[in-house]
Amino acid sequence: MEEQQRQMPGQSGDRIVMLGVNGGPVISPHEAKPALALVVNDAVYLVDCGLDTSRQLVHAGLGFAGVREVFITHHHLDHTSGLPALLLHGWTARPPLPGVNIWGPPGTKLQATNLLAGFEQEIGLFQTGDGFGAFPAAEGHDVEVPLDGSILRVMEDDNVLVDATRVFHGPEVANAYAYRFTVKHTGKVVVFSGDTAAPDANLAVIAKGCDVLVHETQDNSAIERIAAGLPRHRGEHLKKHLFEAHSSVLDLPAVAKAAGAKKLVLSHYTPVAHPPVVWLAMATPVAEAIGYTGEIVAPRALDVIPL
C-alpha cells in the first residue's frame, strides 16, 4: 500500500478525507465513528455523520464553513449520532456552518426537524448573549429510492452529481443506500457503499467503472470470539447480524474487480479496529489470486485519498 498522507490545514485539490473509519455503536479509544468527506472545489460533502464528525472536521483542517450537504446511508446511530453536534458546534465555529441540507432514507426530514429538540434554551442563550447570530437552518430531505433496485438522482449542484441505490444491510434495515458522486469538472466518480453485505447486486451496478470505491469491511474471523464474550442470546443475535449484513474483507477485491474500480478504499472497520497493515494483509493475497490490479488502501482516520 502506498502510505496515505494526513489531511493538513490549507490543503487543496479534490479529495476524500476519511474523518472516521471505525464502525459500530461502541466507542473505542482513539477511533472515530463513520464520517467521510468528499471535498470538491473546497465544498465539503459529508457521507454519514458519526459521533466524532465535528471534532474530526476541526482536526482535518476542514472546519465547518465549507459543509453544504450531508448524505446519510442508513439510520444506524453510529452513522447519525454526530448530527446534533455538527449543527450546534458548527454554528458557533468561526467561520460558521452555513444552512445545511441533510439527505437520507425516509425519516430524515422528520429527524432534521426534531434534531435539536430540547436544546432551545441553549440556542436561545447564545443567540441573545454571545454574538453568534441566528441559528442556521437544517433542511431534511427524504430520499425514496425505488424498490426495484434502480438508480435515483438525489442532488446536483455546480460541483457534483449525486445518485443513490438501495443496498442490503439486513432485513431489519428497510432503507440502506449507497451513493455515487460524479465530479463535474474532472469526471471522476467516487462510490460510497454504505453498510452492506458483499456482493450486493445494486452496488455492482452503481459502482461500475468508478475511480474510487469506498467499501465497508469486516473481519469475519473475529466475530465468534467477540460473540463469545456476550450472553448467549445476545451473542447469537450479533453473529446473525454481522454475518448477514456486513462484508468480509476477503470478498472486497472481487467486488472491486467486478465493478472495474480503479481504487478500493476500505472503511467502517468491524468488529475490530485492526491497524491498516492487518487489513491489507487479508485483502492483498485475495486480490493477487483473482487478478484485481487496482490499488487497495486501508486508511486511518484523517487520511486523505486524492482524486
Image (cartoon, helix red, strand yellow):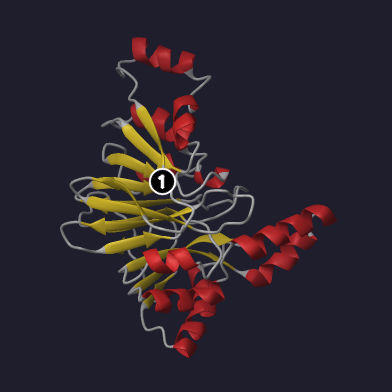
SS for dot 1: helix
Image location (x, y in percent) of residue 199? 52, 70
Viewer can see residue 306: no
Q: Residue furthest left?
A: 185
Q: Which residue is mark 1?
A: 56
Residue ID at (72%, 61%):
239
Q: Residues within 10 Å of mark 1 (few under 14, many from 20)?
A: many
Give 52 or 206, whichever is nearer the viewer.
Answer: 206
Q: Is residue 97 above or below residue 47?
A: above
- In terms of depth relative to the viewer, which is nearer, 59 or 54? 54
Residue 205's spot in the image, x, y percent?
A: 40, 67
- Judge whether residue 296 can be spotted in this image: yes
Residue at left offset 47%, top offset 87%? 290
Q: Nearer the viewer, residue 146 or 289?
A: 146
Q: Quadrant of the C terminus?
A: bottom left
Residue 259 sits in quarter: bottom left
The disc labelled 1 sits on which kind of residue? Gln
In the rendered view of the protein, which quadrant contains the N terminus? bottom left
Q: In screen coordinates, is 296 left or right of 196? A: left
Q: How many numbered circles does the render carry?
A: 1
Residue at 42% of width from left, 17% of height from top? 123
Residue at the far top: name it. Answer: 128
Q: Is residue 235 left or right of residue 57?
A: right
| Towards the viewer: 157 or 300 | 157
- Asked if 27 appears above or below 240 in the picture, the reply is above
- List the single residue furthest toward the front: 148
Q: Residue furthest right?
A: 232
